Structure formats: structure tokens, C-alpha cells
Amino acid sequence: MNSLQIRKCRADEIAAVGAFYDRVVKNLDENINYPKWLYKIYPSEPFVRDMTAAHTQYVCLSGGEIAGAFVLNDDPQGNYQKGTWSRELPDGEYAVLHALALAPELQGRGLGSDVVRFCVEQAKAAGYKALRLDIVPGNLPAQKLYEKNGFTYVGDFDLDRGYEHIPVFSLYELNW
């Protein structure tokens, strides 16, 4: 149904993907910034550069235009061992989805579910046993997206990230 192309970000796309995240964060700031992302700070071009160098930054294209971006890796970027997961898995045995953003004008068209399905397929193919993620408590769009796609909420935890503006994160998991 959706003609979404998803692939790893190339070095020549770093600036464009960074600008895409800036546009998304600016839109969030003008409406409701559910994820509490910070304009030009996170996610931003330096983040995209680092994740592209690590081969974990993805770009979603629709009609040749950037429609979305996300990171898929096995780095929780915080203490996920604090979570009350349904399966005890050491770091490295589960994949983690980060910084999923969709173009504001394309939201509500099922693209988020397409991205989540892609991430599940990639994680399974890579031999991971689960896909985990965290969101800011109260991020209703993300909560609805992940729950609709089979994720289970496991609780809110301080992940030792040291963000004063986000003291705890809501953890979600999908096991197979």
C-alpha cells in the first residue's frame, strides 16, 4: 500500500537527514513536543553523522523525498537492565529502536507501522531475540504506534541518562 523505501543512510545524506530531524523537531515545538526532543541538539546532524558512521542510521524515502528516519542498533544508550522485562536478555541479544521520526505531513498514513515492521524483520534477521525501545512518558502517538504493533509496556524507569528534563522513560518490548 505505502511506497516507502527504507535503507541505511549514506554519508552524502547526513546533512539532509539532519535537516529532516530539525524540521520535525521544529514542528513538534510548534505543536506538542511529545518526545521532548531538543532542536539542533537531539536528534540532529551530529547524531546522524555518528549513527551513519556506525551503520545504524536509516532513512525512509517516499517519492524520492525523506519521509522518515530512525536508528536501529543494540545500544540502549542507558541502563536497560533496570527494566522489568518479560525475558531476561543481556545487552547485545536484543535490538533497540531510537529516534523514529516521520514527516509531519505524512503522519497518520501507516508509515510508522511500516517502519516498525521493517525494524522487527531486520532484528529477527540479525539474530536478535527481541526489539526494545523507550519513549518519554506521555508520548501518546508513540505509545499508540508501538502498542498497535504488538509491543508491551514494561514500566517507567530512570535509565541513568542524566537528563533533568526527562527523569524516567517508558520501556516497551516485543519478543519472538
Image (cartoon, rainbow, N blue to C red):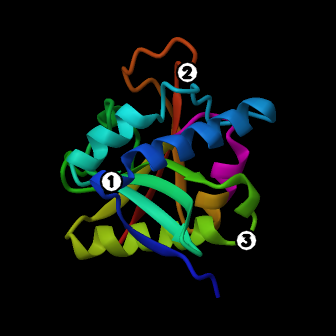
Q: Amino acid at mark 3?
A: Arg
Give me the disc on residue 12: 1
Q: Which residues are magenta?
A: 135-144
Distance between the alpha carbons at the discs numbered 2 and 3? 29 Å
**Who is closer to the viewer here, 2 or 158?**
2
Q: Tell me which residue sits at (44%, 60%) in the image.
A: 59
Q: Mark 3: which secondary structure?
A: loop
N-terminal of the pair, mark 2 or mark 3, is: 3
Spot occupied by residue 111 in the image (x, y as percentages of width and height): 62, 69
Residue farthest toward the top in the current orientation of the protein: 164
Spot occupied by residue 105 in the image (x, y as percentages of width and height): 75, 58
Figure quadrant of the C terminus: bottom left
Q: Is residue 120 left or right of residue 41?
A: left
Spot occupied by residue 120 in the image (x, y as percentages of width and height): 40, 70
Q: Tell me which residue sits at (65%, 66%) in the image.
A: 148
Frontmost of labels 1 and 2 is 1
> Is any part of residue 86 visible from this angle?
no
Q: Mark 2: which secondary structure?
A: loop
Give me the disc on residue 166: 2
Frontmost of labels 1 and 3 is 1
- Circle 3 sits on which residue? 109
Q: Mark 1: which secondary structure?
A: helix
Q: Amino acid at mark 2?
A: Ile
Task: Please say if 3 is above or below 161.
Answer: below
